[in-house]
Amino acid sequence: MASITLKNIKKIYPITREEIRSNKRAAKKAKDLPPEEGFVPNLQITDEGVVAVQEFNLFIKDKEFVVLVGPSGCGKSTTLRMIAGLEEITEGELYIGDVLSNVISPRDRNIAMVFQNYSLYPHMTVYDNMAFSLKLAKLPKDEIDRKVREAAKTLEITEILERLPKALSGGQRQRVAIGRAIVRQPQVILMDEPLSNLDAKLRGQMRSEIIRLRQKIDTTFVYVTHDQVEAMTLGDRIVVMRDGFIQQVGTPQEVFNHPDNVFVAGFIGTPQINFFHNIPLSIVDGDYYITIQNRGIRLAEKYQTALKANNVPEKRVVVGVRPVHIEMAEDGFTGVIEVSEMMGSEVHLHINLNGDDIVAVIPTANLDLESVSLGKEFTFNFNPNLIHVFDAETEKNLI
């Protein structure tokens, strides 16, 4: 088993000067267009080429399960492939254990990788697919058989060892792909969006399988996904990425409860957090207040302490309120229900609050469902202890 250390990692994909000029022109033109008409590339274009990953610093402890999460094009898969040795590192240092691994070939890193598309040999049985790397290593036949059957038992696929991949379901194929990885007993297992090809029910089942698998085998996992639900349920820590940069590293609960910036707050959490933009932060009798829809709200003590300690002046802020922290109230904000989504134990409401779309998650226990039907007025409030306040200019959390 091994830890992984990434120090100042940078990845640049070289492109021609004409491509650089063309991309720069496109980016400049896009900035002059309304958002719905233009586009701004996710990745930075420099004279060296396209910068896919930059200033990436991370230490992954031995036997830790770390999830890289972010939108498409943020650099998470590129980072994973650099750890695997499938992409060259432009700058920086990669250590696997105590060994500098930048120039070590992929086959010598003792790393296994599980891909999105399974990558099984169609003409080989499940047994032969799992045994293939062990045969290349020229292990004795009895040892190969023991390792394959132990991995198959762990993944509960013993009964399908003689089948071909075409005779398997998507979930079974993914188990075989994972089995092929763990049979080698690698020091690190890398997973690149392994569940994205499965339907919702199977994804839920496979998440549980991966959690159980992690408890059975002692190794280091690095998992890539764009699905924040997977990130929150699987990872010991999650690394939120955007445009090649790390935005925040922390446990799922830390990132959910205290997002470092507006992007992280908006990306983590389902349904997505509600934002109130351009909100005035004022000081009244030495205390900090925000004003939303003409209602003054005194900030919680944790904000009072932090803002006073940093001598923060009056300014404009962005306020975030998670849907699960919105409650029905007799007095508060009143809007009109435009969408009502019944989810069984809870109902998701989209409320038009003077032009703002506010999402609320309300438990259905003891709830009069007629009161949350379309077109009804809905009055709600939220606990000031459970809101997030960000600087409107820097988008950084103010505590």
Image (cartoon, rainbow, N blue to C red):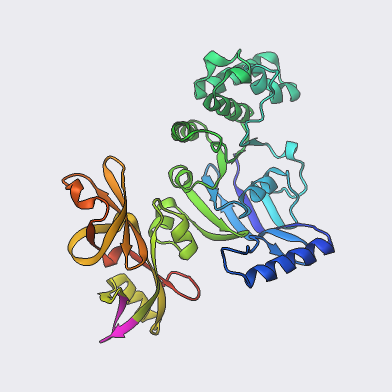
Give residue 353's position: percent from left, percent from top: 31, 65
Q: Is residue 36 left or right of residue 290?
A: right
- In this view, the residue farthest toward the front is 375
Give residue 219's position: percent from left, percent from top: 56, 37
Report which quarter residue 74 is drawn in.
bottom right
Residue 321 seen in this snapshot:
no
Front residue of 89 and 16:
16
Report which quarter residue 299 is drawn in.
bottom left
- In this view, the residue farthest toward the bottom is 285
Residue stretch rendered in magenta on the structure? 282-291
From the image, which quarter does the N terminus lie in?
Answer: top right
Main SS, magenta residues = strand
Which residue appears at 67% of the width and 46% of the height?
83
Residue 281 seen in this snapshot:
yes
Front residue of 367 and 142:
367
Report which quarter residue 181 is drawn in.
top right
Front residue of 22 and 85:
22
Within the magenta stretch, is there residue 285?
yes
Q: Is residue 218 left or right of residue 204?
A: right
Q: In this view, does 38 lie to the left or right of 104?
A: left
From the image, which quarter does the C terminus lie in?
Answer: bottom left
Front residue of 393 and 35:
35
Within the magenta stretch, is there residue 84?
no
Would you place residue 232 above or below residue 118 in this image? below
